[in-house]
C-alpha cells in the first residue's frame, strides 16, 4: 500500500491534482538527488540517483515546498486550510494538524532556508489558530506593538473594554481634539458622543494602558515582554 500522508489531500496515483491546492501523488518510489557526471567528449551529464521508497516525510517536504510557491504570499492560508479541512473531514483532530504545521513543517522552512515571508505567514496562522489563542479574537503577538510603539502609531487600541481602530494618529490628533471641542459647543444634543471621544483623547495623552490585561499576562508568561 502506498505510503500516503493522512494530513494532506493527495491526488490519486497516476492522476494530476484536482486543483491548485492538492498535492501530487508521488507514487511508491522516487528518484533521489541527481548528480553530475563527466562523460566522453568532456561533457557533463546529469545522472539520476538510485530509486528510494516514498515515505510520509516526502509528502511533508512536498507540502512545505508547495507553501513557498503560493503567490501572493498572503494567500497561504487558503492552502493550509484546504488541507486542514481535508484532515478534519477524514476524522483528524484540528489541534494535531496545527502541531504538524508547527513541529514538522516549520523545520522544513528552517532547514532549507525557504522564503522568510511565507514562514512568517505560516507562524502567524499557527499563532492565530492554536487552541489557547482561539478564545481571543486577536493574537497576543498582534498586541506586541503596544509595547514598542507610541500610542499614535498603533492601528488598534483597547479602550473601555473594547478593541477598536485607533481614531487618532500623529497627523491629526490635535486637530481632532479641536474639532470635537467645537462640535460639542455647536451640537450639545450629541454631547454624550463628544464627551466619550474627548475622554479617549485625554486617556491617550496620559499614555494609559491600551492592551488587554489578559494579553499582557500572556506575553509576560511567554517572556515576550518583561515587567519594568
Image (tube, helix red, strand yellow):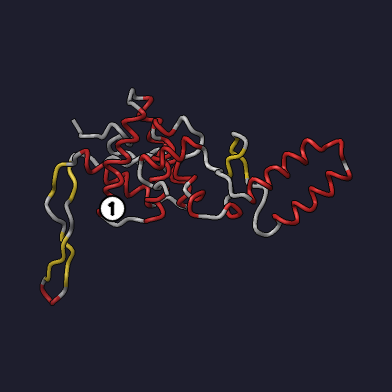
| Percent coordinates x, y for residue 114 in the rendering | 32, 55
**In the image shown, does 10 or 201 lie closer to the viewer?**
201
Q: Please name the residue shown 62% across and 49% down the image.
A: 206
Residue found at the far right of this picture: 186
Does 62 sit left or right of 149 as displayed? left
Quarter holding residue 49? bottom left
Residue shown at the point (45%, 51%) measured from the top left: 73
Secondary structure at badge 1 equals helix
Residue highlighted by disc 1: 110
Write the residue at 16% across / 66% down: 36
- Residue 28 drawn above or below residue 207: above
Work out whether 38 lies above or below 208: below
Which quadrant of the view contains residue 94? Answer: top left
Position in image of residue 93 (x %, y %): 33, 26
- In terms of depth relative to the viewer, which is nearer, 27 or 160? 160
What percent of the width, then of the height, locates residue 78?
45, 40
Question: Which of the image's four quarters has the N terminus?
Answer: top left
Amino acid at each position: 500500500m502506498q505510503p500516503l500522508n493522512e494530513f494532506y489531500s493527495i491526488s490519486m496515483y497516476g492522476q494530476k491534482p484536482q486543483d491548485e491546492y492538492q498535492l501530487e501523488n508521488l507514487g511508491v518510489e522516487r528518484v533521489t538527488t541527481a548528480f553530475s557526471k563527466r562523460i566522453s567528449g568532456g561533457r557533463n551529464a546529469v545522472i539520476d540517483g538510485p530509486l528510494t521508497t516514498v515515505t510520509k516525510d516526502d509528502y511533508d517536504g512536498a507540502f512545505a515546498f508547495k507553501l513557498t510557491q503560493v503567490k501572493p504570499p498572503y494567500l497561504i492560508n487558503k492552502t493550509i486550510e484546504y488541507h486542514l479541512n481535508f484532515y478534519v473531514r477524514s476524522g483528524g483532530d484540528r489541534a494535531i494538524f496545527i502541531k504538524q504545521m508547527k513541529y514538522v513543517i516549520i523545520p522544513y522552512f528552517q532547514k532549507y532556508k525557504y522564503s522568510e515571508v511565507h514562514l512568517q505567514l505560516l507562524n502567524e496562522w499557527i499563532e492565530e489558530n492554536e487552541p489557547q489563542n482561539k478564545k481571543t479574537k486577536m493574537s497576543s503577538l498582534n498586541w506586541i506593538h503596544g509595547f514598542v510603539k507610541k500610542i499614535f502609531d498603533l492601528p488598534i487600541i483597547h479602550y473601555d473594554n473594547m478593541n477598536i481602530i485607533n481614531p487618532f494618529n500623529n497627523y491629526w490628533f490635535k486637530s481632532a481634539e479641536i474639532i470635537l471641542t467645537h462640535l460639542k459647543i455647536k451640537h450639545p444634543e450629541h454631547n454624550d458622543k463628544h464627551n466619550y471621544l474627548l475622554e479617549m483623547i485625554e486617556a491617550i495623552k496620559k499614555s494609559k494602558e491600551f492592551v488587554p490585561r489578559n494579553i499582557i499576562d500572556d506575553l509576560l508568561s511567554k517572556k515576550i515582554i518583561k515587567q519594568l
